[in-house]
Amino acid sequence: MKKNRTLPRLIKLLGAAKKTLFFVFLFVLLGNVSLLIAPKRIGSTIDAIFTGQPWLGILLSILLFYGLGTLFLWISARLAVRVSNEAANALRKSLFDKLSRLPLSYFDRTPHGDIISRFTNDIEAVSDGLNSSIVQLISGVSSILISLGFMLYLDYRVTVVVLIATPLCFFVGRAITKYGKKRFREQAKILGEVNAYAEEMISASHTVKLFRHEKRSAEAFDRLNEALYDAGYRAQFASALVNPTTRFVNNTAYVLVGIFALLAGMTSGNIAAFLSYMSQFSKPFNEITSITMQLQSAMASARRLFALLDEPEMTADGTLSLPEKAKGEICFDHVRFSYEETTPLIKDFSMHIPAGTQVAIVGPTGAGKTTIINLLMRFYELNGGKITIDGINISNIPRDELRKQFGMVLQESWLFAGTVRENLLFAKPDASEGDMIAAAKAAHAHSFIERLPNGYDTRIEEDGSNLSAGQRQLLAIARVMLVDRPMLILDEATSNVDIVTEMRISKTFREIMRGKTTFLIAHRLSTIRECGIILVLDHGNIVEYGTHEELLANHSVYENLYLSQFRHDTT
């Protein structure tokens, strides 16, 4: 994304509220006109007092103008808050919608804390920057023009002095702003890193304690926090430097104008009015430079938000459809894939899997077992070759159509904040109470659910932290049993349950797998002996395949894996 596209995109975002912005402009203009009439009336009051003329009526009119001006500016401020909130809401919605269109690779390479930081800190920075700048920018520009008109009316010669002196304030402020721009960008970047690290340490708190990493993680956080402090200090120092510097320049100009006004022979009332207009004329320059610093912070955050919005999305969906329930005949045809271009993982993977076959995938860590599943589900796209289901290339099938053909239980059983019932019905919201309970019983989860404080209405905390790992796994299994899908993926589906429960669930799995194409990823080889095909992978390639008996008879890789595990299990 080009740097100079950030501001136009923010302006375009505000354009969605152009009607409200029009009224913001209208009320700001009315408010400034009302407030800037008052100094001329004050000058008239002073001259009236010195000349002995009636002045009470003029004084009352001043109060009226000040009251109207305050009311109009208050209305404009309320409308500006609405505009900035609508812009923030639109950004937040665009970001959330964008996440659903991003490939899984983005989440794999981007710290989750950094993504969360964009949703919270960066959007708030943009909202605050817009809220503080909309009214002040419009008010500042209109105040400058109206004050200039009144000063020219009072004395054009002294006005020339003001026009020469005031730009000095602007250029001084601009020089400081330029310095602060880089600082705010650095601050936003480091803040994302701090949030990402904190999120990672909180999520992995058990691992941190297990390996006694508390001190080292605290030291690493302190380094990041110190870097954030330094970046924030430099950014805020630049921001704080603007007002004192520009005020000094303004006050110097103020003295000079007073001297020239006396030399020009202006009346006392007109001098008072002129100095007031000069203050109103120069004040927006101070505010605009100060606002510019806030805008720099908002721009730095907006740049990070737009960078996320500009991330490459998933490739276009296909248009072909599978039947409501596919047969499940799967063919891998010369599949090639790598997570990194320089490190090929799957070089030439071919395999035909008849419908209804139970396929076990085994191999050492990093062999490509889970990658095969990721490619089958189109979580990642192929670099070459093709995968077909019932003869249809999955690249031509819409992702939603493809994924609704699969039931899936992963080793990491993700649950959402909500009730047990809501989590079980997540994949099939219209399921009946009886079907839900039957699925829970089949997964041997019903008994422990009944023992929970509110049964199926017990609320599960975020990530299921108030349940054991085994209980979470049983709920994930019950959830997939509730949906009747023609193909199943079981990735270490019973890894977190005890042996007795595993044996019971295995019987249930055998029932629901009957007639379904099933992929099992398992490290415990004793659980896959009955599979029709066992694939042994190594570095993304099939090194051998066959039934349990056939592979043992080959006296090769699988036999070594099986016997080594058997010896380990019996010692």
Image: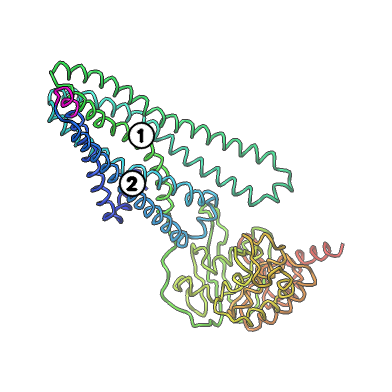
Q: Is residue 220 visible?
A: yes
Label 2, secondary structure: give it: helix
Locate residue 364 relative to residue 127 in the image: left or right.
Answer: right
Mostly what secondary structure, the magenta segment?
helix
The residue range painted magenta reads: 45-52
Q: Mark 1: which amino acid?
A: Ser
Residue shown at the point (48%, 77%) measured from the top left: 392
Residue at 33%, 22% (x, y): give it: 248
Q: Is residue 5 left or right of residue 513?
A: left
Q: Amino acid at mark 2?
A: Ala
Residue 342 in percent (x, y) is at 52, 52
Q: Position of residue 100 (x, y in %)?
A: 47, 62
Does residue 173 sit above or below 35 in this rendering? above
Q: Quadrant of residue 411?
A: bottom right
Residue assigned mark 2: 77
Residue lying at 62% horizontally and 78% vertically, measured from the top left: 482
Report the front residue among 134 and 190. 134
Residue 32, percent across and down?
24, 40
Q: Nearer the viewer, residue 209 or 130?
A: 130
Element under label 1?
helix
In front of the other: 300 or 327: 300
Q: Nearer the viewer, residue 473 or 253?
A: 253
| Figure quadrant of the C terminus | bottom right
Residue picked out by circle 1: 290
